[in-house]
Amino acid sequence: MTAVGARAPSFTLPDTSGELQGLDGGAATVVVFTCNHCPYALAWHERLIDVARDFASRGARMLAINPNDAERYPRDSPEQMRVRVERGEFDGVPYLRDETQEVARAYDAKTTPDVFVLDADGAVRYRGAPDADYEDPAQKAAWLRAALEAVLSGGSPEPAETKPVGCSIKWKP
Amino acid sequence: MHVELLFWAGCPSHEKALAELREVLAEEGFDPGEVVVRKVETEGDAATERFIGSPTIRFDGVDVQPEPNEPAGLTCRVYRRRDGRFSPTPDPEDVRDALRRAHARTAASGEHSAPAAAATATAEERR
């Protein structure tokens, strides 16, 4: 289980072009477990990508990971992930496939989305939802933004943990 | 009118959908207590019920947003609000339109359509 304050599990996963991606020790890393078929993940998606864009110049990097069982949920297949990336929906954010679901289990991810913010040392500094309301775009992923601001300025995120909200991770039988 | 909400517990959206459905029913003069809430628990049940995701709302068996090409299964349903946002619940205005269409169908067929006053009377008669 990955609790706030613990070191985040390292991983290497393929993106939609087959290139392996992982944690690189940047100033801040956002690991988002997400997917294609969940309305909560879709509702928050643009807000998350906006955060990646807004914080990239400050050394923050986002990695989106889809861990869902694509056999039972075909919309989460690598092919459908590639379609979304090719449509430009991720705007340069790597969309990684966790086929074995080992990374999701290592992080104890619960839902899509489930957001983790890591500092330069790889410690988890925030975990939970992007903001308080998936229905309100004006929230602009405020909890995630606040966490990144804190990590990048050497402070402590407040809140450091919120309840992840979304569809349950679709584990393989 | 037969109003039903089918849900799968793997999706946390059904309570909000039920609340919004009941609000629309009340606003349109129907009894919000008449909603039949049913839990879909297995892939087999989903296939039998032609359940394409949670939540699913039907008026007299007709989906508020029919998607005939969607496969049945235990999943969260993706709706679009009228402003284009993705949502786990249907836009209440779409629910309202579907309710009015269902009521018009019932009225055209000459069958009883259970508006609030009639539903109340029926409940009274049962006592």
Image (tube, rainbow, N blue to C red):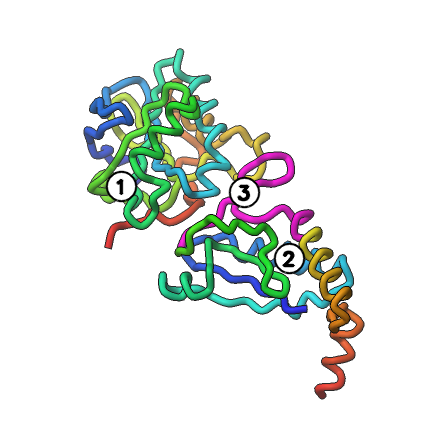
Do pointers 3 and 2 mark residues of a single chain?
A: yes
- Crowd band around label 1 with a 10 angstrom C-alpha radius: few (<14), some (14–19), many (20+): many
Q: Is residue A96 left or right of residue A43?
A: left
Judge by depth and name the residue closer to the eye, A156 or B20: B20
Distance between the alpha carbons at the discs numbered 3 and 2: 15 Å
Residue for badge 1: A104
The furthest residue to the top: A57
Picture coordinates of residue A120, whole percent (x, y): 27, 21
In the rendered image of this protein, does residue B23 appear above or below residue B48?
A: above
Instruction: Tell me the residue at 47%/37% (across/down).
Output: A42
In the rendered image of this protein, does residue B72 appear above or below residue B116?
A: above
Q: Secondary structure at mark 2?
A: helix
Instruction: Tell me the residue at 23%/42% (across/down).
Output: A101
Q: Are marks 3 and 1 in contact (CB under 8 Å)?
A: no
Q: Secondary structure at mark 3?
A: strand
Residue for badge 3: B87
Judge by depth and name the residue closer to the eye, A34 or B98: B98
Q: Does the magenta segment cover residue B75?
A: yes
Kindly identify the amino acid type of the residue bearing the numbered disc 1: Ala
Distance between the alpha carbons at the discs numbered 3 and 1: 24 Å
Do pointers 3 and 1 mark residues of a single chain?
A: no
Magenta residues? B74-95
Q: Quadrant of residue B100?
A: bottom right
Residue for badge 2: B21
Query: In the rendered structure, which disc, 3 or 2, sits on the residue that comes first in sequence?
Result: 2
Instruction: Tell me the residue at 39%/41% (across/down).
Output: A112
